Amino acid sequence: MIELIVIAAAGFLLLLFTFLRRKTPARLRPIPALTRLYRVIGLSVEDGTRLHASLGRGSLLNPRSGATLAALSMLRYLAERTSVSDEPPVATSGDPVLSLLTQDTLKAGYEASGGGDLYLPTTGRLSGLTPFSYAAGAMSVVRDENVSANVLMGNFGAEVALLVESAERVDVPTLGGSDDLSAQAILYAAAQEPLIGEELFAASAYLDAGPAHTASLSVQDVLRWTLIVILLAGAVLKLAGMF
Amino acid sequence: MRVLTAAIAVAIGLLVLAGYFVPALAGIQSMLLGWAMILAGAAALLGVFNLISVHGEKFLRREKGTLYSALLIVSLFATFIFALFLRPDHAAIQLLVNGIILPSEAALMGILTVTLLYAAIRLLRQRVDVMSVVFLATVLLILLGSATLLPFGEVPLFGNILRPWVNNVLSVGGARGILIGVALGTLTTGLRVLFAIDRPYGGK
């Protein structure tokens, strides 16, 4: 019952804030990784290099699909902004369903920017089906395909270290975020611009994906503060021996 | 067409979600998830075709890494044909898996260990701030706490007091905070898909 109330409340707040955000745009705190992402998108278009987006190996059939869906939102934005570049962006993934959605998202991004005929199906790739084969396949893209920036967002495991390392070897900056704790720790240590915790889900809002995305951040804040109040109240009640 | 796709996706999403709360819809939920599994299997086949087309194109264009692309395609077809005729549980196919795939993955695992160590060493060169110092200090503390000081057993203070405290109090608290953030992000992302605001299945 509690789950249903939380989902219903979040849904109502999302619609409400989306309506409000259409009138008053949100002011967002700067996140260095996303500021850098803006810059690398511009640079890749200007100097004729390509972006490599890797969306991890998260399936859409398990609870980890949230990070994957957030990564697809971000990919859509990247495709829209860089489809006019001489070198189209390449997206790799380690799950077959995600690979199909990657192709569809890239295609939709190209069509939205008016370059639908420039879309190449081979730019959305399944690089491997196991964690390490996925990493090995994606590593070769970073190394061989004139990549100027590496964007890793989605569900990864420890294999993300291999991806970051291969980018580091060819002096390509890496921006990365994951919903997995071990991958987050690795990205914090190895990537130049890591995204911590829920920052991964904020990416699309920072990239001007629309009022619903900034409204999502407001909903998350409301829910987060509610949880904080409940946790503190619970602790106080426990200390007072009433709970 | 795009409206129809969105309507189908939203309707199925709502039915699956409702299946968790309305017992009468559990059967429909289970059936829809079964269909999703079958589609995922078909997607795996399409993924293999994608792999062949990417590497086939690389080979035909003589791009960098052509040799590896050719090797991948030959290996893929050879494995497929052998497994088709001999069956996947045949000793020769098992030898192929145990002799090539497992050692390759184990080698990558070994490289991963070295990579992680190198990343930790490089961290302060990349970002000099308080959090990086705390991160490295914690790594060292946990390593010391996990190491054995032969012949005396675990390192005193680190092994029996500091490591369990960091593991059970600090890191659990931090991990829960991060996971709550991830869960809230997942919730709002899922709702955007349910409301057809985000359409990862295509659409402008």
Image (cartoon, rainbow, N blue to C red):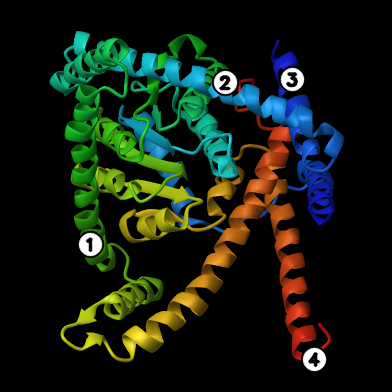
Q: Provide the residue designation for mark 2.
A: B38
| Residue at the image position 52 percent from the left and 71 percent from the top | B172
Counting every numbered tag in the picture gives 4
Residue sitting at x 45%, y 83%? B165
Determine the CA span between mark 4 and mark 3: 52 Å
Same chain for mark 4 and mark 3? The answer is: no
On the same chain: label 2 and label 3? yes
Q: First in sequence: mark 2 or mark 3?
A: 3
Q: Residue at x 78, y 52 (%)?
A: A3
Q: In terms of secondary structure, where does tag 1 sit?
A: helix
Chain under disc 2:
B
Examine the rendered structure and indicate whether residue A99 appears above or below residue A173. above
Disc number at residue B75?
A: none
Circle on res. A240: 4
> How far is disc 2 from disc 1 in space, using C-alphas?
41 Å
Q: Which mark is residue B8?
A: 3
Spatial separation of the CA atoms under disc 2 and disc 3 = 17 Å
Q: Quadrant of residue A225?
A: bottom right
Answer left or right for B64 relative to B194: left
Q: Position of residue B176 (x, y in %)?
A: 58, 66
Q: Are marks 4 and 1 on the same chain?
A: no
Of the residues tagged 2 and 4, which is closer to the observer?
Answer: 2
Which chain letter matches label 1?
A: B
Chain-order first, disc 2 or disc 1? 2
Instruction: Give the number of the mark in front: 4 or 3.
Output: 4
The residue identified by callout 1 is: B117
Distance CA(mark 4)–CA(mark 1): 47 Å
Amino acid at dot 1: Leu
Mark 2, residues whose alpha carbon is within 10 Å: few (<14), some, or many (≥20)?
Answer: few
Give the CA separation, mark 1 to mark 3: 48 Å
